[in-house]
Amino acid sequence: MSQVNEKPSFGIIPAGSIRFNTDSSRMEIYNGEQWWDIDSTSPVQQTGATRGVYSASAPSGTTNNIEFITIATNGDALDFGDLTRGARLLGRASSRTRGLYGGDYPSAGNTIDFITIASTGDAQDFGDLTQQMYNRDGCGSQTRGLFMTGHNPSLQNTVDYVTIAQTGDAIDFGDVSSTKNAIACCASPTRAFCTGGSNPSRLNVIEFFTISTLGNTTDFGDLTHIISLHSSCSNATRGFSIGGYDGAVEDQIDKFEMATLGNAVDFGDLSTAAYVTAAGASPTRAVVIAGLTAAPATSHNVIQYFTISTGGDTIDFGDSITAAHSPACNTNGHGGLG
């Protein structure tokens, strides 16, 4: 008799659920918002990211490469595995253990792939987004992954979410403030941020969701300049908007404090100006991967980094294997670092 592998129906993790955390070898209970150690009065502490794993499509969008770096150690990227299909302009979201890649270009697909970040190997099918979409981004918490806006074939304002630990299809979370694409997202443990984008005029808006509560975005503040096709990452307390395109290729890095509403401030510059890059972070370092260095399109394989605690310009980290166009990076820190 053959075994039928059915994709489980998607649902929210019920409060009171119990799991064994293989990272800490401890039992944990879910309170409806986050996991708590059963033998403690404190929530499970989020670990700092050590690995950045990114999709690395060539400019044609037909390659399905996945590459990775160790964020604390300068050096060239290594091969991780393959996506289930060749794709770029993906959304992404991650927990400490899993990384998700959703959407597709040039075919505007709705596929979600997942990887186990600690183990090299090929991606597997996770489920589907609520609609076909490309030129979007995403982020998340330790439990939920959000995929925001995009193009299909017109601009959208919808946001999907999944429970990262449970394979299955996405469901509707809420809406961002306007239809747009070419955004960049990052997250703290409780908030998901959507920055910039194009509708089709370029924007400087920062808006956020409370990840545990379905609904629409709230205004947070503004970036220092209008920007689209940029990247974003965080170390759980500071969020960054990096590079992008505003009629010219940009090198500027903006910073905002994620707990306090307000505008971003200038942090420093990329040593190599670029747009459609990928970004990921540990508690102390942020890395900026590949992208395009000139309009209309010149792919490069430069990886740059900066120290999060001190403003300043990026420093050379190493090279990606692929001169990647529109990579998407996941890390194994709190969700949404990459």
Image (tube, helix red, strand yellow):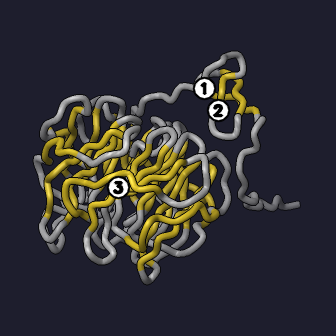
Q: Is residue 125 left or right of residue 333?
A: right
How much space separates mark 3 and mark 1, taking CA atoms? 28 Å
Q: Earlier in the sequence, mark 2 or mark 1?
A: 2
Q: In the rendered image, which residue does mark 2 sit on?
A: 35
Residue at 41% across, 36% down = 236
Q: Quadrant of residue 178?
A: bottom left
> What residue is drawn where x is 46% and y is 75%?
156
Res. 236 in view: yes
- Which labelled disc corresponds to residue 206? 3
Q: CA distance from mark 2 to mark 1?
A: 6 Å
Neighbour class for label 3 at 10 Å: few (<14), some, many (≥20)?
many
The residue at which mark 1 appears reads as 43
Which numbered disc, 3 or 1, marks the residue that appears first in the sequence?
Answer: 1
User: Up-down: is 229 above or below 267?
Assistant: below
- x, y percent for residue 274: 18, 58
> Of label 2 and label 3, which has the lower sequence position?
2
Observer-nearest of 83 and 292:
292
Labelled pair 3, 1 in contact (Cβ < 8 Å): no
Is residue 329 shown above or below 190? below
In front: 60, or 329? Answer: 329
Residue displayed at 71% across by 24% down: 27
| Residue occupying image coordinates x 37% and y 49% | 67
Question: Helix, strand or loop at disc 1?
Answer: loop
Mark 2 vs 1: CB contact within 8 A: yes
